[in-house]
Amino acid sequence: MSVVPDAVFFTEENSALAVAERLSKTEKTRLSDTLIAVVGQVHTIIKEIRPTPEEWQQTIAFLTEVGHACDDKRQEWVLLADLLGLSALVEDMNSRRPPSATQNTVRGPFYRPDAPHLPLGANISLDGVGEPLTVSGIVQGLDGVPLAGAMVETWQANSQGFYENQQPDLQPEFNLRGVFTTNADGRFHYKTVKPAGYSVPDDGPVGQLLGRIGYPLLRPAHLHFIIKAAGYQPLTTHVFDGSDPNVPEDALFGVKHGLLGHFRKSAGEATAPNWALDFTFVLCTEKAEVRR
Amino acid sequence: MSVVPDAVFFTEENSALAVAERLSKTEKTRLSDTLIAVVGQVHTIIKEIRPTPEEWQQTIAFLTEVGHACDDKRQEWVLLADLLGLSALVEDMNSRRPPSATQNTVRGPFYRPDAPHLPLGANISLDGVGEPLTVSGIVQGLDGVPLAGAMVETWQANSQGFYENQQPDLQPEFNLRGVFTTNADGRFHYKTVKPAGYSVPDDGPVGQLLGRIGYPLLRPAHLHFIIKAAGYQPLTTHVFDGSDPNVPEDALFGVKHGLLGHFRKSAGEATAPNWALDFTFVLCTEKAEVRR
């Protein structure tokens, strides 16, 4: 009667094995190995959670909505990965550094290439709105040697917590973005305004879902940096305002002890406060590789 | 300097814990419990696979494409869940039956409500294209008592492997669909044509990805049934052509030993073959519950 009288078919008990067996019969590639690992864990999750048919439909609907919320300007899947620590994990696994080096972090969605190259001391706040901040720093190697001619690219939110590419009609083009070059002492400095923290987008399916259970969606105030020097590994990182109350619960899990900056209030300023930040960036040589 | 001098921040080592801790501080709900379980397993998967930044981007792009391929007529996420055995697992977990009862399976994407109610013996092949098949059967309880007045709804692909709602311009409306009622002996019978097996859609991101590694995308020939009788649990199931060579690798993991039907060729037919199938459906009472 049947072509397979003794075949073992899919059951609740052997489900992951049944799928993995089928995958293992395909051409062995990175993709098939990955799918075998993913399938095993996802079957485990489903057996642990035991979704009802309604919950399963809601899950499918949510996954679908996350995709539908993605377009050229918005990546809702990246947002979900960010908020669940997946982006930070992948970034950390792929940029292991010695403990004394400045740690890498995600670049985030607001980066724009082609920011203007500016002379040291320039002001990147093109509209001057906010509390003035002077940023200075040094770029050095693990051995403490200052790196002259290093490229220091920075971008940040304004005093309301918005990047210029979020507000193309309200902020000047390339506001609060610039590229500087360190001097002979490995140092750089520029003027800007103190950035504000902000909430990640909460109007899409991801923000709606996680906001519903009171999950943290706020980022503490920070500056973004990409530092490049010949012979050294490029560094993509944040410097956070260490006094921001949202530091312990950064929505993107980007905060690390070595990335907390001290925004100092200039002495003797009675009216509008002036701020200063000095930070040391420590790069690894291209050959330095850390395996744990 | 910092508001949290002793805080423990996210690291590669504590990643899942850092996220779970944040989730555990939210309101305790089914959703937060689910997310805690999901996050733990997904961090495990990522640590096992160790995606490169490029692979991670490809993953995000794939997930996005799956969502973009979904519309009113196509559910690519369900297809992915089907092909990885997730739909079958959820279905099995939610419809546990005693071993002697007919097993439940997924309903699949081609069901349409409002199929016509027909008298016993009617022909549901409205275009008559294909090899004639007479389907008969009995609906009974676990105790073997025939169930009179039970509703037997059926739908199937045609002799080319297409459902009428896949070919609205080529097949008559409601072709190969019908609802019958069992007689006083619990029996039903109708005429149709022998269905062909088919491939699940392979023109979207899911079929493309899995087809690339030679993963099975074919379904063996089958008939769909929904059986309902007062006082009994509704049964949604397939009856497969047990002689179809694709039975061992049904793309949707729907095949079970008890669902293999014997399509008999009528004796003495020299030219166009006539086929017959007889099948016994065993229902559980509403109160019957199987917990393992």
Image (spheres, coloured by chain):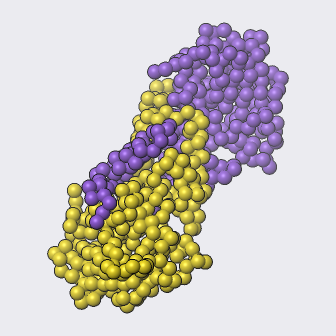
Chain colours: A purple, B yellow
Which residue is situated farthest in the front direction here? B270
Residue A269: horizontal and vertical position, in percent? 73, 26
Q: Is residue A173 left or right of residue A240?
A: right
Q: Is residue A207 left or right of residue B147?
A: right
Position above or below: B273 against A21: below
Q: Is residue A152 left or right of residue B124?
A: right
Q: Is residue A177 left or right of residue A32?
A: right
Q: Please give the count of numbered marks on the rendered protein.
A: 0
Q: Residue at x 56, y 68 (%)?
A: B73
Name the foreground residue: A254 vs B131: B131
Which residue is situated farthest in the left direction here? B143
Residue A169: horizontal and vertical position, in percent? 80, 49
Among the 4 quarters of the image, the one containing residue B196: bottom left
Position above or below: B71 against B17: below
Q: In the rendered view of the protein, which quadrant contains the N terminus of chain B?
A: top right
Residue A146: horizontal and vertical position, in percent? 69, 11
Would residue B87 be seen by someone viewing this image from the given angle?
Answer: no
Position above or below: B162 against A267: below
Would residue B74 be seen by someone viewing this image from the given angle?
Answer: yes
Q: Residue at x 45, y 53 (%)?
A: B216
Name the foreground residue: B256 vs B196: B196
Name the foreground residue: B86 vs B219: B219
Residue A69: horizontal and vertical position, in percent? 61, 55
Q: Residue at x 23, y 69 (%)?
A: B101
Q: Residue at x 73, y 28 (%)?
A: A153
Q: In the rendered view of the protein, which quadrant contains the C terminus of chain B?
A: bottom left
